[in-house]
Image (cartoon, rainbow, N blue to C red):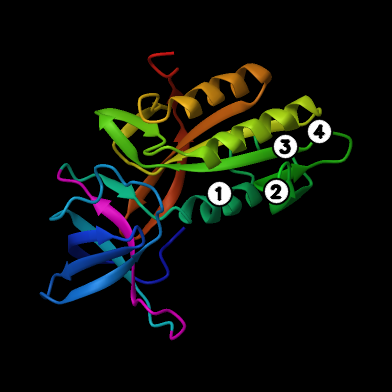
Amino acid sequence: MRFQTPLVPGTLIRRYKRFLADVTLADGQEVTAHCANPGSMMGLADPGMRIWLEPNDDPKKKLKFGWRLVEHENGHFTGVDTAVPNRMLKAALEARKVPGLDAFDTLRAEVPYGEKSRIDFLLSRDGEQDTYIEVKSVTLSRQQGLAEFPDSVTARGTKHLHELANMVAQGHRAVMLYLVQRTDCDRMTLAHDIDPTYARAWLAASASGVQTLALDCHITPRGVELGKPIQILKPSGL
């Protein structure tokens, strides 16, 4: 998935009100960018970090820049836009490029299910069980090479795990898919110390038959591409 507009580098001044960020561009101009990430962005929103913005000339948008990437000192990138995973994965699913999720007749997105929830993707095939896919963006890393989810307490994420387990109980297939939007991680785990309730819900969902898949990404200022499956480690402390 290529960015629609070439990204421009800048230096983060501050992130505030979750969805806003003040940034200094290379020419010294200060702008406010939209931050499409409701999480804590732990380790990704420190003042002085080098980040990349996507300009836009859409008259319907109040802010003319969107924050897309963080560039780390080691040359690696983290994608901070939580809308990217679903857009990229939809294209990959349609192209039959997601391992283990390539056998279906119809693909639907945002289908209502469970208790006032919407599943990210529902795969269907005549004569076979439906496949319910929930997608989460993973951006936290506190240990070299290891990505973690979540970066803050997520009651909504816990609810989604319960919903997936219910789908399995009803005879369907359910997949919890973590998209690791970091180029410096080759393993993933659950951040038990940040949200022990979520970690326990993941263990229970896994025991009930919910499958877990973690995929990495190839990220540059030109775009983001789906990568390969990576190892998922059992959360420590459980």
Label disc, if present, on residue 89 of the rendered structure: 1
- 3 and 4 marks in contact (CB < 8 Å): yes
* Kind of residue indicated by mark 2: Lys
User: Looking at the figure, which quarter contains the C terminus?
Assistant: top left
Residue 211 location (% of width, % of height): 62, 26
Q: Is residue 87 above or below residue 192?
A: below
Question: Against 70, is 157 above or below?
Answer: above
Q: Kindly check if marks 1 and 3 are in contact, taking CB atoms under 8 A apart as contact.
A: no
Which residue is more in the foreground, 14 or 125? 14
Q: Which labelled disc corresponds to residue 116?
A: 2
Q: Is residue 41 left or right of residue 153?
A: left
Q: What's the amino acid at mark 4?
A: Gln
Name which of mark 4 and mark 2 comes first in the sequence: 2
Question: Disc 4 and disc 2: Cα gap in Å?
Answer: 22 Å
Please state which of the two labelled residues, at mark 4 or mark 2, is closer to the viewer: 2
Q: Earlier in the sequence, mark 2 or mark 3?
A: 2
What residue is at 34 percent from the left and 77 percent from the top? 64
Q: Which residue is mark 4?
A: 129
At mark 3, the secondary structure is strand
**At label 1, which amino acid type do we have?**
Leu
Which residue lies under the disc numbered 3?
131
Decide if residue 203 is in sight here: yes
